[in-house]
Amino acid sequence: MAEFHNATNCQVTESSLNSTLFTNPQPTPVNVFVLEVSSSPLPLHPSIIEKTFDLPRPVNDSEVLIFQSEIGTTIAGFVLFYPTYCSFFGKPGFRIQDLFVRESYRSLGFGELLMKAVANEAVNLGYVKVEWSVVDWNVGATKFYERIGACVLEDWKTFELTNDALFSCGKLH
């Protein structure tokens, strides 16, 4: 399969397949990092990673009350991702399903913070990559991803089965 896809840097072995597919405990099926902002320090909690920012401009958030949490923080964005498997390398990776930063909080470094959090999680787990798709009309996102070092896989297309096609394809008899 690696040859078919011209994956010349394939590093998979029988041993790596066995250890990563059949004996390694798998992480949670779906992960989400929620970006919450606050003008004051957050209460200590093991699931909270606190980072202090000096913002280059004031945030004018007309929807602050809609996105306010129980602890008084404001949800500014999130990234939803899940584990995948890269058969070319014989190791897992992450696929980002959604990365979203609310408009009031864009261009402040929060998208990069979320991407770095996912990349850091992948590195800490020994994963080989993080991948995602972006719609072709989203030029701003494309430029952002290229700026942080991501490369566009021009020779790949994304396919999906939904609705009637999913049910039709899913029939086994």
Image (cartoon, grey):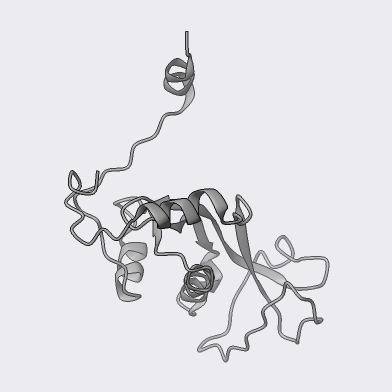
Give how far across and how far down residue 93 sits, in percent. 45, 59
Q: Residue at x 64, y 65 (%)?
A: 34
Determine whether 108 is above or below 63 in the image.
Answer: below
Give how far across and how far down residue 91 sits, in percent. 42, 58
Q: Nearer the viewer, residue 156 or 74?
A: 156
Q: Name the residue at the top extreme.
A: 173
Q: Name the residue at the front extreme.
A: 15
Q: What count of labels does the image hold? A: 0
Determine whether 36 is above or below 8 in the image.
Answer: below
Q: Nearer the viewer, residue 27 or 15?
A: 15
Give how far across and how far down residue 48 sits, in percent. 71, 75
Q: Residue at x 52, y 61 (%)?
A: 100
Task: Tell whether 10 sits left or right of 76.
Answer: left
Give how far across and how far down residue 86 sits, in percent. 38, 53
Q: Nearer the viewer, residue 97 or 85?
A: 85
Q: Quadrant of the N terminus?
A: top left
Q: Residue at x 61, y 65 (%)?
A: 33
Task: Tell whether 10 sits left or right of 79.
Answer: left
Q: Nearer the viewer, residue 156 or 60?
A: 156
In the rendered image, which quarter is residue 55 located in? bottom right
Q: Residue at x 45, y 57 (%)?
A: 92
